[in-house]
Amino acid sequence: MSSEPVNVNDFKELARLKLPKMYYDFYAGGAEDEHTLRENIQAFCRIMIRPRVLVDVSQIDMSTTILGHRISAPILVAPTAGHKLAFHEGELATARAAAAAKTIMILSYSSTCSIEEVASSCNAVRFFQLYIFKRRDISALLVQRAERFGYKAIVLTADTPRLGRREADIKNKMIAPPMKNLEGLMSIDVNSDQGSKLETYANETLDASLSWEVCPISCSDSFYFYFLSSLGIIFYHPQDIMWLRSTTSLPILIKGILTHEDATKAVEGGVDGIIVSNHGARQLDFAPATISVLEEVVHAVKGKIPVLLDGGVRRGTDVFKALALGAQAVLIGRPVLFGLAAKGEGGVRTVLEMLKNELEISMALSGCPCIKDITRSHVRTQHDKLPSML
Ligand SMILES: Cc1cc2nc3c(=O)[nH]c(=O)nc-3n(C[C@H](O)[C@H](O)[C@H](O)COP(=O)(O)O)c2cc1C
Ligand SMILES: CCCCC(=O)C(=O)O
């Protein structure tokens, strides 16, 4: 491509030209037939915006607050593995770009720069994404390191009891990117010579028994516990989430929720936020497009905790649509990786700026000067029956 990129999608082609095929496929690919990968994008296209005119939009304020942290726009950096496969400075470059954009970066546990290196590289607000390993002591240690180094929340990814079948990675015999946080704790080498080594590594190490299973809350020394149980009232809590809580005082968000059933369990389980996500369509093919189930989750949550969304966000209008359907903010995954591969830190900055600029113009042209002005009535989904469609 000879000309400069003018939108986020242009970065994908630039990245393809720069990256070795194995890495490009790893970043771009989805699970199996990639039906959900396409749907994540196409479902946004089926939603129309209902603009209002003659609203004073001479000042647009995109700033918002997530878990008490003020950011310049509701667009966060999603946790993604292996940034050094894209650019030699890896997550340090991404973190600096997030700081420049005044937004939050969620660092993947499988980052190629460590929790500590990223913390000292910039003053972006950072969250830390976690998987729970069979070796729980290692997960607990990572959480404690993140907390000590100033990360502000733990994002527990719940959609990966096993790694999805990413067929390009299987064909390419994808190797696991070097995971700096695990140095000295766990080997990422696998014996197998077949298929995706990343998949083998993940399936050997991640704890697939993680569940919502509940146990009675253990506060046996509490007067209230005796009092309430004497009335037959007992509180039950999901024990795995309780375990995570016991390792940290940070807020916990659950990433990978797609149904009202799980959203309700998350609220009852006392988590601090939900990320509606299908892991960028890399796990279960034929999982629904995230934007198509956002409202279902938002209704179940009833405003008790923040709901965020990722998957297929490529335009400012996509951000606008997600906010109209009840998300507090969105996360972007691949656009950041493609920006990083194409132009390093500057590429990630440009990607974030492009989306912010597009959101700004979408708000202006829809008659929404502030984030809170974006409401459900600013979009029309295929399920809405409006007089204009009858
Ligand atoms: C190359 C790649 C690596 C990823 N690694 C992780 C990860 O380590 N942990 C995680 O929770 N999600 C991971 N994800 C999923 C993202 O956090 C996010 O859900 C997804 O990329 C959003 O969709 P989008 O790429 O269409 O924006 C990864 C996604 C990609 C593309
Ligand atoms: C075991 C590392 C998994 C990284 C990941 O979540 C992804 O590639 O989607």
Image (cartoon, rainbow, N blue to C red):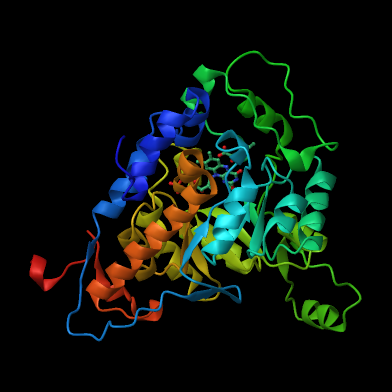
Residue 134 is at least partly visible in this image: no
Q: Is residue 52 above or below residue 210?
A: below
Q: Is residue 102 above or below residue 80?
A: below
Considering every residue shown, the one lying at the far right of the view is 221
Residue 274 at x, y percent in the picture:
55, 62
Quadrant occupied by the N terminus: top left
Q: Is residue 203 left or right of residue 173?
A: right
What's the residue at 50%, 17% (across, down)? Answer: 171
Quadrant occupied by the C terminus: bottom left
Could you say which is closer to the camera, residue 180 or residue 301?
Answer: 180
Residue 51 at x, y percent in the picture:
20, 73
Q: Is residue 237 left or right of residue 75?
A: right
What's the residue at 47%, 48% (across, down)? Answer: 347
Counting labels gives 0
- Picture quadrant where residue 316 is located: bottom left
Could you say which is closer to the camera, residue 90 or residue 79?
Answer: 90
Q: Is residue 161 left or right of residue 343?
A: right
Could you say which is closer to the camera, residue 238 or residue 246?
Answer: 246
Could you say which is closer to the camera, residue 373 or residue 192?
Answer: 373
